Image: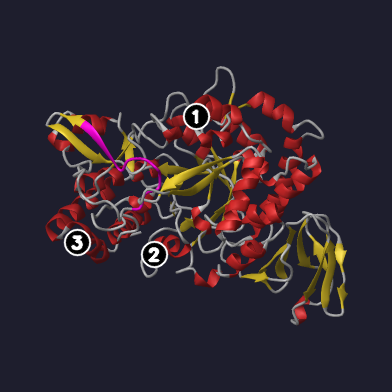
Amino acid sequence: MTIHRERLQERLVFVYGSDQAAKLCEQIDARLHNASRPSSSGRQLNQEDVMLITYGDQVHEPEKPPLASLHTFAKSYLQGIASAIHILPFYPYTSDDGFSVVDYKEVDPNLGQWSDVRSLAQDFDLMFDAVVNHISAHSPWFKRYLAGDPAFAEYFIEADPEADYASVTRPRALPLLTEVETAHGPRHVWTTFSADQIDLNFRCPEVFLAVLDVLLFYVSQGARFIRLDAIGYLWKELGTSCIHLDQTHAIIQVYRQVLDAVAPDTVIITETNVPHADNISYLGGEADEAHMVYQFPLPPLTLYAFVTGNAKPLTQWAAGIKTATFPKPGTTFFNFLASHDGIGVMPTRGILSEDDVATMIKAVEERGGLVSYKDNGDGTKSPYELNINYLSALSHPNDSQETRVLKMLGAHTILLSLAGVPGVYFHSLVGSENYRQGVEESGIPRRINREKLDLGALVDQLETTGSLRQAVYHGLRQRIALRRQRSAFHPEAAQEVVDVDDRLFVLLRGAGRHRVLTVVNTSDQDVQLRWPLPSHADQAGPWRDAVDGTTYEEQDGQLVLNIAPYASHWLEPV
């Protein structure tokens, strides 16, 4: 694939000016000429794409690199389930469980080496994190800046501590600037997330090129998916919010152009935990930008539905998410319920009331979870995320194991049904619960959902009849396998939300006889569904539940069935 030269130059001129743009075009040409070009399958995303989200050292065995142990687990327990694996940052790091990277091009020796990553890539598509908004304070790049190396003099953002930063969006309740001692005296550098995560200065063309080299390297090492972490904060402009600026979008578009030319199978995912309109702006509109954006409202809204037995907010929100609104073919959502981070509260703004959020927070705290807060910039703080394992969040302390499993399967049936590509977190797949010991030992609330597991012990539990892990794993395995067999769940297949009862989440996917009606009861009550059947001739006849095979006959032009508490169904025309 060739690169659109005029469009490339136009974007570079916008960001860097005409003189720098000309030089950058030449440097990009050289990289295109020398780049390693992976073979292209030409395969587009479809209903078979399901991603597992995991740490590289999620499972471990004696005398074996954790990445190799992950591969062992994947070959036994992910075949036929996951098409792809998102390995969370596996580079050397100093904090934030991997998101303060020391060296982008090295594998943490505690996890393994590049050969282990490439071996995994032979059996699964892989997603790498590009943590390029910031880098570790202990990285060679920052050390050379501190030492006064002129080659790195512009790599980081020096700022005046007396300037007005009131308009800057603040994701964490930590200082925006950090004072450091350099060879030229004390300086204040920009640190959006922590003092150990120094923001890179993309005004510097050398930074832009260095990051491009990282992305090309990742593709050469087996990355099909590239996750641009915290990418919304990339460009800083004093007097603005310093998030979602036009320069940020332009830089992502240039990276997309280059990757399209070198490795057209590459899928870019932007991680932007922001309101819907800002989030989908990264899909590019008229321009080619990200292929997928995270669907951040889904985890808290699904949790709220099961906590309260009221799916109305989830239904109303989902009704506004239509596949026809995607900017262009090949763009979609990355849907998930749980991840290495907490359950975000900010995406529920304008959807849930403050009382609704307070209800959810109370339930999370009763279920052993914690709440993290963000700095609003005016001296106040507000809830930012709920730190809790998703199975624990769904489960009332008095729930039986059967009820807990039903809730978990119901929530993930919603996840697997919505338009987009689903991502399932490792601890969700294997039925893990809160890991409070990790929080107590580290003081880090997010560790509650980041427990590292002994592979042998995990396998024993997964193979133990009647265990919680086995029940959750086999239930999710069945649902995922069914999803992958049905074109109704193609990321771009038609989607219609059906509002029939506040306790139910009902969703129709697909077209004609290739339709699937998702029905999930989020309450502890029996609910009767009465759904007027479509009048199309090809919809006549009974419907069958793909999950258990039960057939339901038409009754006076309606599909009528009783939905047990927390039950979930996939109904399709026979």
Where residue 423 appears, as percent x and y from the top left, is: 57, 49
Q: Name the residue: 77% across, 41% down.
A: 398
Quadrant of the image for the C terminus? Answer: bottom right
Query: Which one is earlier in the sequence, the residue at label 3 or at label 1?
Result: 3
Which mark is on residue 68? none
Q: Residues within 10 Å of mark 2 (few under 14, many from 20)?
A: some
Where is residue 320 drawn, in percent x and y?
A: 56, 70
Residue in the image at 34% along x and 51% along y = 233
Left or right relative to 149: residue 90: right
Which contiguous range is marked in magenta?
Answer: 169-180
Q: Looking at this rendering, what residue extends furthest in the front direction?
A: 379
Report which quarter residue 526 is drawn in: bottom right
Up the image or down, 527 lies above or below 20; here it is: below
Three-letter code, disc 1: Gly
Lateral position of residue 533 relative to residue 127, left or right: right
Q: Secondary structure at mark 2?
A: loop
Mark 3 or mark 2: whose residue is earlier in sequence? 3
Name the residue nearer the viewer: 222 or 563: 563
Q: Label 3 amino acid?
A: Val
Q: Secondary structure at mark 3?
A: helix
Q: Amino acid at mark 2?
A: Gly
Q: Nearer the viewer, mark 3 or mark 1?
A: 1
Horizontally, is 184 left or right of 517 in the view? left
On the image, numbered disc 2 is attached to which residue?
A: 284
The residue sitting at the top extreme is: 63
Is any part of residue 68 visible from this angle?
no
In the image, taking residue 516 as reference, residue 561 lies left or right, namely right
The residue identified by callout 3 is 13
Please say whether residue 178 is one of the residues in the magenta stretch: yes
